[in-house]
Image (tube, helix red, strand yellow):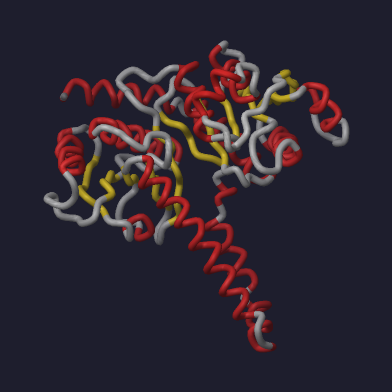
């Protein structure tokens, strides 16, 4: 049974939605959960729920909480007994196979990097985000772990994204593209040109530069970028989907005929919502650290927490890190 440490205090709606997501996860999946946070408070909260296997949840005491606004590195050093530090510590000790948090992203990245270390051949971790496209899904890496990378770091993102796409999303030899301002090899800054050359020499299935439109076209499976660009891309994409849904609903409900059309098309809207709903994937893997770490959206709901635990379980069972290490060795042999 896969054992997963869950930060009970991470996210805008913690601990309530985290607890409910954990309970739903143990009902559906073969997992054991370490629920990390203030022990007495969590015991009282868990006691409110009935009809779940309490033997598959263990509360681990962590009296400090790292808030969203806190500076990550300083908070990790100062709050050693935080739910993030304690949860990742369970992975370091070998008690837990994976860790999930919807809390302070920077703090999770910092703690995981310091406590777990990095895989052999990997110099910086990267956050991978799954985005829907016209024919399936695209994987963007990095979405915020490293905003000032070197060209070789982006090459490493490419091989990590390739391994994840193959083992979790099920496509052999996925295509890898470099997010740039144009498709031509000569486009972009010197940094981008150097990255392009290194990706061409790497063992991944590199198809060249891709543009923003390719994120949703399905022309490329894994899209590589630095954490600054990736995080902005993610936030813009989330905002666009929410804005489209708002205006569409507003217009449809503005007249009798529109309301009738909305009722008839309701199943279609539900399917659309499912395709763009971040909670379907639950969280983003932090690839490159020597362990399985999933980072959730700050607004994670019960469904998102449940699915994050599911993906953590799958990542453990499919041995993603072994594949990444193997790819990194091939890359080092070529450099």
Count every numbered label the image shows and give the total. Answer: 0
Residue 176 screen position, x and y as percent: 28, 44
Front one among 325 and 314 = 325
Of the 4 image quadrants, the one containing the C terminus is top left
Front one among 54 and 225 = 225
Is residue 23 toward the left or the right of residue 70 in the image?
A: right
Front one among 204 and 242 = 242
The image quarter containing residue 128 is: top left
Is residue 152 toward the left or the right of residue 64 in the image?
A: left
Residue 198 screen position, x and y as percent: 17, 35
Identify the residue at the far top of this view.
Answer: 93
- In the rendered view, tell whether residue 40 sits above or below residue 294: above
Front one among 6 and 306 = 6
Is residue 28 toward the left or the right of residue 275 in the image?
A: right
The structure residue drawn at horizontal position 68% and vertical position 84%, both measured from the top left corner, is 260
The structure residue drawn at horizontal position 57% and vertical position 73%, both measured from the top left corner, is 247
Residue 77 screen position, x and y as percent: 54, 18
- In the rendered view, tell whether residue 163 sits above or below residue 259: above
The image quarter containing residue 4 is: top right
Of the 4 image quadrants, the one containing the N terminus is top right
Residue 102 screen position, x and y as percent: 60, 37
Is residue 8 toward the left or the right of residue 242 in the image?
A: right
The structure residue drawn at horizontal position 64% and vertical position 84%, both measured from the top left corner, is 258
């Amino acid at each position: 049974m896969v054992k997963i440490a869950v930060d009970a205090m991470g996210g805008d709606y913690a601990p309530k939605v985290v607890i409910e997501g954990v309970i739903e996860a143990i009902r559906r999946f073969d997992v054991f959960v370490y629920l990390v946070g203030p022990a007495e408070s969590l015991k009282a909260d868990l006691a409110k729920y009935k009809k779940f296997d309490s033997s598959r949840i263990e509360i681990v005491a962590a009296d400090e909480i790292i808030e969203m606004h806190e500076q990550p590195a300083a908070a990790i050093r100062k709050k050693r007994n935080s739910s993030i530090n304690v949860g990742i510590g369970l992975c370091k000790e070998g008690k837990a196979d994976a860790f999930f948090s919807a809390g302070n992203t920077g703090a999770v990245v910092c703690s995981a990097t310091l406590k777990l270390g990095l895989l052999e051949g990997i110099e910086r971790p990267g956050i991978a985000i799954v985005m829907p496209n016209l024919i399936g899904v695209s994987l963007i890496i990095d979405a915020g772990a490293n905003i000032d990378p070197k060209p070789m770091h982006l090459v490493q993102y490419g091989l990590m994204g390739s391994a994840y796409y193959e083992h979790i999303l099920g496509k052999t030899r996925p295509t890898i593209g470099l997010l740039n301002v144009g498709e031509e090899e000569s486009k972009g800054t010197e940094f981008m040109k150097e990255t392009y050359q290194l990706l061409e020499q790497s063992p991944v299935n590199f198809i060249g530069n891709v543009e923003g439109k390719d994120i949703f076209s399905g022309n490329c499976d894994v899209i590589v970028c630095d954490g600054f660009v990736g995080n902005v891309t993610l936030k813009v994409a989330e905002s666009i989907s929410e804005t489209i849904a708002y205006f569409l609903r507003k217009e449809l409900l503005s007249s009798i005929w529109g309301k009738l059309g909305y009722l008839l098309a309701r199943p279609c809207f539900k399917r659309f919502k499912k395709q763009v709903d971040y909670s379907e994937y639950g969280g983003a893997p932090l690839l490159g650290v020597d362990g399985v770490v999933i980072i959730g959206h700050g607004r994670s709901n019960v469904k998102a927490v449940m699915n994050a635990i599911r993906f953590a379980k799958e990542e453990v069972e499919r041995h993603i890190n072994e594949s990444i290490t193997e790819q990194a060795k091939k890359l080092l042999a070529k450099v």
